[in-house]
Image: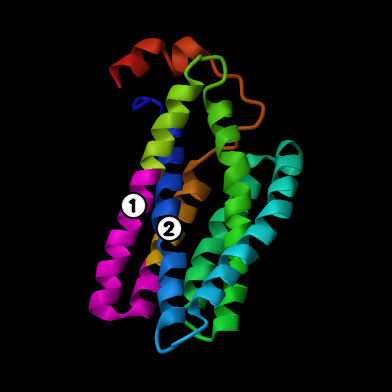
Amino acid sequence: MLAHREILIFALSVTLFHFANAAMLPLAGHLLWQGKATGASLYMSACIIAAQLVMIPVAVFAGAQADRWGRKPIFLIGFGVLPIRGFLYTLCDDPFFIVAVQLLDGIGAGIFGVLWVTVVADLTKGTGRYNLTLGAIATAQSIGAALSNVVAGYVVNAWGYNAGFLMLAGIAACALTIFYWSMPETRERDIQPTAQLSPAIYLTA
């Protein structure tokens, strides 16, 4: 896996995405809670439900159009909404505004939930190493998500919520840039297992 450039690029991109994404909702929840004796839990629930309501139709759309449009154009939409979302959180702390911004989370979650496993399948086609690659990238994503909350917490504690959101938005922009410039379209690939992903490479990695 470490010798396969496209897998590394994809793993890096989605790990940075989850690094940027994981802490946004908790930070938004803390922002909703500050200065309010009641209602914070209600707004937090609204954020979660709003994202889920958007995620379902987006996931259906992404799955239906992945073969027609290609994986990369749809994935770029998911990458693109995250830095926008992070920046919008800095503009206003009104609960209704924050819930509205959280709708963008449903777009990213819906696209990622459907397409990342599809891209891994494209990259490992004919190799017999799909599950191994899927598990490795899922682990990398989990590490990114865990670090997101730790790093964002330190930034917010030192410089405030706006700095935290802008830091996460900057990381999301890096993920978008890497994916846009370095990740090729993976639809209808014809990978040769011995040349691209030999079992020896996987066992060594």
Q: Secondary structure at mark 1?
A: helix
Q: CA distance from mark 1 to mark 2?
A: 8 Å
Q: Position of residue 30 (x, y in %)?
A: 40, 75
Q: Residue at x 33, y 52 (%)?
A: 146
Which residue in the structure is indicated by mark 2? 22
Range shown magenta:
142-167
Name the mark on residue 146: 1
Quadrant of the frame with the C terminus = top left
- Neighbours of disc 2 within 10 Å: few (<14), some (14-19), many (20+): many
Q: Position of residue 106 (x, y in %)?
A: 62, 59
Residue 173 falls within the magenta-colored stretch: no
Looking at the rendered structure, the kind of residue marked 2 is Ala
Question: Is 116 placed above or below 86 here?
Answer: above
Question: Which percent across, then down, holds residue 188?
Answer: 67, 27
Q: Secondary structure at mark 2?
A: helix
Kindly indicate whether the residue at mark 2 contacts the one at mark 1 (C-beta within 8 angstroms). yes
x, y percent for residue 5: 41, 31
Q: Please name whichever residue, 193 or 128, is drawn nearer the observer in this view of the structure.
A: 128
Majority SS type along the magenta span: helix
Q: Is residue 119 above or below residue 89?
A: above
- Inspect the image, locate mark 1, and give the three-letter code of the amino acid beneath it: Ala
Number of residue marks: 2
Looking at the figure, which quarter contains the N terminus?
A: top left
